[in-house]
Image (cartoon, rainbow, N blue to C red):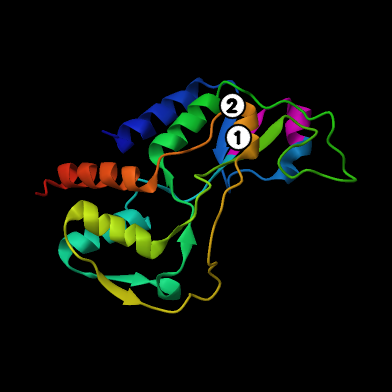
Amino acid sequence: MTDFHAHVRDYLRIRRALGFKLTFHGQVLPQFASYLQAAGASTLTVQLAVAWAGRPDMAMWLFTKAIFAGEPIRLFDYGRVRRDFTYVDDVVEAVVRLVGVPPAPDPAWSGEAPDPSTSYAPWRVHNIGNRNPIEITEVVRLLEEAIGRPAVKVLEPLQLGDVTATYADVSSLQAAVDFRPDTPIKEGIARFVAWYKDYHGLA
């Protein structure tokens, strides 16, 4: 059984033990490359594609909570939105593998044709995602199946500024550590619902 909070504690222990900086998307940007080069600091950035399980701010938790409570779920773009859901165990596996591969400068990097995922400084960015966008109505169906209760669905238009689908290209992750997230959404949801029921003392 996945223990999300144990994963978080493990990550924090790993980060303290590292000889280089591990950040998540939004904490470091490529324009810091000159500083990294001067300081000799290696930095690895990972971008997570809808990482879920145990996060109360994510759709999976919010939908599960609403289904148990009999409350409505808002489905945008009339339920046609697709997301590349990435199970927490796959995120942890990818991060643990990446900490053993400190970034090094890319000697082939060129300002004439820059590759945004590498740098002339010791910096790398990798996507961590399942590479399989799932329509949100299918996610709700799988949650209904795992919970054993129907969802109250409210279909609404696509929100302004939202995207209809997300998809993570994990080719650089696979090249670096020979790993691609692959937990099927049905298996992940079954694990999550079992954990959620145990965590909240639900029958």
Q: Secondary structure at mark 1?
A: helix
Quarter of the picture containing the N terminus is top left
Q: Is residue 120 magenta?
A: no
Q: Secondary structure at mark 2?
A: helix
1 and 2 marks in contact (CB < 8 Å): yes
Residue 38 drawn at (x, y percent): 78, 29
Q: Which residue is denoted by mark 1 in the rendering?
A: 173
Q: Amino acid at mark 2?
A: Val
From what the image shows, is residue 17 above or below residue 142? Answer: above
Q: Seen from this angle, which residue lies furthest bottom?
A: 157
From what the image shows, is residue 153 above or below residue 14? Answer: below
Q: Nearer the viewer, residue 8 or 134?
A: 134
Instruction: Say few, some or many: other residues with alpha carbon within 10 Å of mark 2 (under 14 / 14 to 19 / 20 or more).
Output: some
Is residue 54 visible to us here?
Answer: no
Q: Seen from this angle, which residue lies furthest left?
A: 203
Quadrant in the picture for residue 30: top right
**Magenta segment, which residues?**
35-45
Q: Which residue is denoted by mark 2 in the rendering?
A: 177
Instruction: Say few, some or many: other residues with alpha carbon within 10 Å of mark 1 (under 14 / 14 to 19 / 20 or more).
Output: many
Residue 46 drawn at (x, y percent): 57, 40
Quadrant in the picture for residue 156: bottom left
From what the image shows, is residue 57 above or below residue 124? Answer: below
Q: Amino acid at mark 1?
A: Leu
Q: Looking at the image, which residue is at 32% across and 52% down?
A: 56
Marks 1 and 2 sit apart, C-alpha to C-alpha, by 6 Å
Q: Looking at the image, which residue is at 44% across and 50% down?
A: 85
Q: Looking at the image, which residue is at 56% across and 72% down?
A: 161
Circle on res. 77: none
Q: Is residue 42 magenta?
A: yes
